[in-house]
Image (spheres, rainbow, N blue to C red):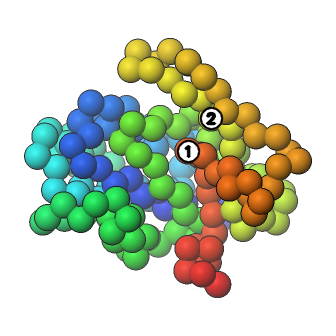
Amino acid sequence: MKKLVSIILPVFNGEQFLAQSIDSCLKQSYCNIELIIVNDASTDGSYSIIEKFANTDNRIRVINNANNRKLPASLNIGHRVANGSLMTWTSDDNIYTPNAIEEMVNGMGNNKADIVYSNFYHIDEHDTIIGSYVYCKTRTILLDNIVGACFLYRKKVYEGL
């Protein structure tokens, strides 16, 4: 059985790219995911976008904060309800490539690692690549603090074990 991956997606007034972000999570080649969307009291159209997706895919769990709690609190709320043994979080303006989660799960297993991170692209509002971030294998997470926008970790890392 494939391990469950929990993807936490906090959002505050992120309607511009939110549908693309959610869609990229749901269209992963690695399908055993749960998407936990923490709506941080958005006042734009974010909630309707979230609701539309949640009504069509049972892998989505929605948490609505009554008041804006900000990013750290919203991430903690999402982490506390996550069921996956593997976890990540993303933003409402991030879009995963279709095999991002699968590649990180495989990388984690192949290297017996507790956390993995990957190269990523910087795109503009028209999906045009305007930059790329490639990590050198000789750099280390402990010395360089180089984790970017695409990463995966075991639940025990979040729990501090």
Residue at x 29%, y 50% (from the top left corner): 11
- The label on residue 120 is 2
Q: Where is residue 46 in the image (x, y as percent from the top left)?
A: 20, 42
Residue 60 is at least partly visible in this image:
no
Label 1 belongs to which residue? 149
Q: How far apart are marks 1 and 2 (CA)?
A: 7 Å
The amino acid marked with disc number 2 is Phe
Q: Quadrant of the C terminus?
A: bottom right
Verify CB contact (< 8 Å) between mark 1 and mark 2.
Answer: yes
Q: Where is residue 121 in the image (x, y as percent from the top left)?
A: 59, 29
Residue at x 38%, y 53% (from the top left corner): 9
- Tally the numbered discs: 2
The answer to whether residue 141 is left or right of residue 60 is right
The amino acid marked with disc number 1 is Ala
> Along the line of sight, which residue is nearer the eye, 31 or 7?
7
Residue at x 55%, y 80% (from the top left corner): 159
> What is the secondary structure assignment of the residue under circle 1?
loop
Quadrant of the image occupied by residue 40? bottom left
